[in-house]
Amino acid sequence: MTYCVGLSVNEGIVMLSDTRTNAGLDNISTFSKMFAVEQPGERALLLTTAGNLAITQAVWNHLQAGVWHNGLLQKLTDVPDMVVAAQLVGAAVRLVAQQDGPALAAQGLAFDCSLLLGGQIAGGPPRLFLIYSAGNFIEATDDTPFLQIGEHKYGKPILDRVLTPRTSLIEGVALTLISMDSTLRSNLSVGMPLDLGVIRTNELATCTRRRITDEDPYYRTIRDGWSQALRDAYLALPRPDFVL
Amino acid sequence: MTYCVGLSVNEGIVMLSDTRTNAGLDNISTFSKMFAVEQPGERALLLTTAGNLAITQAVWNHLQAGVWHNGLLQKLTDVPDMVVAAQLVGAAVRLVAQQDGPALAAQGLAFDCSLLLGGQIAGGPPRLFLIYSAGNFIEATDDTPFLQIGEHKYGKPILDRVLTPRTSLIEGVALTLISMDSTLRSNLSVGMPLDLGVIRTNELATCTRRRITDEDPYYRTIRDGWSQALRDAYLALPRPDFVL
């Protein structure tokens, strides 16, 4: 499994991904699931991946080599805007589906992948997309300014309750770490270390790329602090007034 | 979907279930998923169900009519202890699987049901079981004093962090309501009203059966209070010290 979350707030884009991959519970590895495309002053994109690692790595390989789209061999370094960037990722997914789908199906395996693409290209605003295994995609909006892939349920309640487009980038980083911590606590197949990427609106560069390990002092603060905060919040709530 | 949670703490058993059933998103109904078997002073059992409603109602019908188990036609009113009670529920599940499984499979439908059985029978301690669609079961222990069926993920983090066997019954009621609230907030197919059942250790009776509606003042306190408490807990955590 995997957990990746992306936020699209007024100040920019926050992306956080775990690094655990597994082929069965007895075969666990660490792979980064975050990829960056950057041309400072011109574009900054972050891609995170969930699903079958062979599929998502093939998608990334195609994107680096270039993918035929609208009659042109295009890369994320030369697409004109974020929508075309999302279309290009979708085209790469469809290419892999075409190449590997039948062989996977013959083994009884689903064509399983999903990706988050966040970033900004000069001339347009920052945007955040979720690309499905069918190659189509949805976009985060002001109503729902976050998108998740992989094991999304444990980390969703705090995002549902707190995140708005006015949330600052630094608050967003804290939120994604809390959301990840809830997931790590409840699903063994999501694991440390984490990859964090932040793109500030109109900077057209990734202002932060950070590998967060178990020893990261801030992450430890979140991990210990959030568990304690949940316990405290629970203790502070009134108890039922009806007699048992 | 459904969410049912059961706690087994030193003071007794707490069971909470939602009441929403759906056949597709456009066909939603309200059905109680909690059933009680009580012989005051002798036994008190609560059963909650998740999965295909036709299956779980058939299981309950079989249990009321009596199920052949170990060469005897037995009911939950006359099994000698909680383990045999769980075996009897499992036997009823297998009976329905035998009767309806092939016709369901012919329609491409899975044989989907799971049940929580909690309670106490004179001569033994209170026990809590989760019975699978295969008719086998697991039991809650001191290490993991809760069991869930249905949409379990959203409501698990708070239980993971707070519940111990020393948690009191009244705290347990508050916890199950918080756990349910997180689930209701994030999954539309889990819905109000709720059914609450509490069995106090050695009382051999259900000390509380309560239908909790949207208007229930305590539930409203939990619903509003928990969202606010989560937001406050998040606000109280430190922000990252690294510069973005």
Image: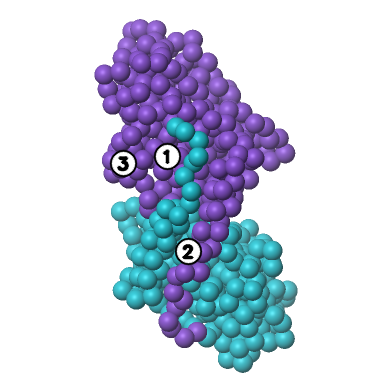
Chain colours: A cyan, B purple
User: For the residue marked with disc 1, what is the amino acid?
Assistant: Ile
Which quadrant would residue A166 be assigned to in this image?
bottom right
Asked whether the viewer can see residue B87, the reply is no
Label 3, residues with CA under 10 Å away: few <14, some 14-19, many ≥20: some
Residue drawn at x 56%, y 69% is A6
User: For the residue marked with disc 2, what is the amino acid?
Assistant: Ala
In this rendering, is residue A5 above or below B59? below
Relative image position of residue B139 (x, y in whole percent)? 33, 33
Relative image position of residue A217 (x, y in whole percent)? 34, 76
Foreground: B198 or B130? B198
Residue named by callout 3: B165
- Is there CB contact under 8 Å for labels 2 and 1? no
Residue named by callout 1: B170
Relative image position of residue A158 (x, y in whole percent)? 53, 60
- Is there CB contact under 8 Å for labels 1 and 3? no
Host chain of mark 3: B
Between marks 2 and 1, how big is the CA–CA gap? 23 Å
Q: Which secondary structure, mark 2?
A: helix
Q: Which residue is at the far left?
A: B123
Between marks 3 and 2, how big is the CA–CA gap? 25 Å
Between marks 1 and 3, how big is the CA–CA gap? 13 Å
In this rendering, is residue B184 above or below B94? below
Q: Nearer the viewer, mark 1 or mark 3?
A: 1
Q: Which residue is at the far top?
A: B72
Q: Which secondary structure, mark 3?
A: loop
